[in-house]
Image (cartoon, rainbow, N blue to C red):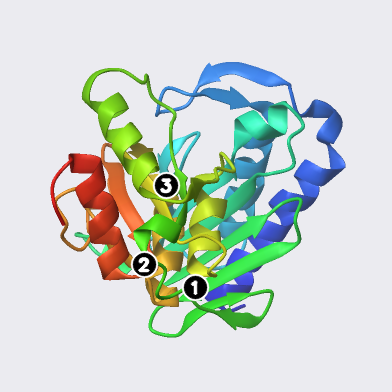
Amino acid sequence: MTLMQVLRRAVEAAKKNVLDNLDLAAEQTGTLNPFGDRTLLLDQQAEDIIVRVLRESGMQFDIMTEERGVIKAEGNPEFLAIVDPIDGSANLEREIPLCSIGISAIPFSDIITTDDVTLSIIDSIFTDETYVATKSQGVKKNGKSVRPRKGTPIENAIISYDTKRKWEGQFAKASSRTLTAVYDMRRSASNLLDLCWTAAGSLDAMVDLRDMLPIVHVCGTHMVLEAGGVVLDKNGSHFTVPIDMNVRMSFVAASTNELAKEILAAFKGVTF
């Protein structure tokens, strides 16, 4: 099997298990994952299935997972696989049909950054959308190439903005400035799905400047970059960070560099 076939098989098997066991959507394991979030039973099952498929592929993977941390390869790793088994677990628990499965692969080396991701797959479990990003080859949604929406001024922009943080102090003020500057906000509560929608032009940007997002969401920023969008860090530079469980992602992912900088300026309260 090719790397693409392995990742697709892993995602499809995990998705089937979720759909076949929706009666367990609210069941919890009683444990916390390495990022401090409660683990749902279906989260754990999806992750276990993905790990099993990767292990049985004949390829050697180190695997970084949301629920179990880093699982080392039995031999010398060829790839690092980064797995978010269910993004939008709270939606799934409440029977809101917006959640996704994400996986990325990176050729293994001693030093790996977000710029090294070569292949990512994100599957929206309930909305029949599968996105595939291949390094230097763009992004396909259900087999058809997609691109970000271009030329939208900030006052007409519809963005996703992650609000999962206490709205107090500077974050509250920055959030108010940002949302006042744009036309409107949409949030699926699956950041991977919102990043796919940004890559495909449904949204103009996806903003997460909380310094809280786990590195397992890298497949989402990879989608935006490979589709032709931009991802900036909070300093306005190209977003790139080490692939490490302790790293938290903070970025503006947008259709254009100009829009990303305008959004960042609004967040900071400075003139663009």
Estimate the spatial distance between the alpha carbons at disc 1 and disc 3, rounded to whole Å.
Answer: 16 Å
What is the CA distance from the residue labelled 2 to the residue labelled 3?
12 Å
Alpha-carbon distance for marks 2 and 1? 9 Å
Q: Is residue 249 visible?
A: yes
Residue 189: percent from the left, percent from the top? 56, 39
In contact (CB < 8 Å): disc 2 and disc 3: no
- Which of the two discs, 2 and 1, labels the residue nearer the N terminus? 2
Q: Nearer the viewer, residue 107 or 170?
A: 170
Determine which residue is flagged by label 1: 133
Residue 128 x, y percent position in the rendering: 76, 61
* Neighbourhood count class around disc 3 (C-alpha, 10 Å): few under 14, some 14–19, many 20 upward: many
Task: Say few, some or many: other residues with alpha carbon within 10 Å of mark 1 (under 14 / 14 to 19 / 20 or more).
Answer: many
Residue type at mark 1: give it.
Ala
Using residue 9 as the reference point, say whether residue 237 is left or right of it.
left
Secondary element type, mark 3: helix
- The reply to whether the C-beta atoms of the residues labelled 1 and 3 are less than 8 Å apart is no
Which three-letter amino acid code belongs to the residue tagged 3? Val
Query: What residue is shown at x 25% (from left), y 65% (from top)?
Result: 109
Name the residue carrying label 3. Answer: 216
Q: Which tag, 1 or 3, sits closer to the chain's start?
A: 1
| Residue at 24% from the left image edge and 50% from the top image edge | 264
- The residue lying toward the viewer, choosing from 25 and 46, is 25
Contact flag, marks 2 and 1 (Cβ < 8 Å): yes
The residue wearing badge 2 is 117
Q: Quadrant of the N terminus?
A: bottom right
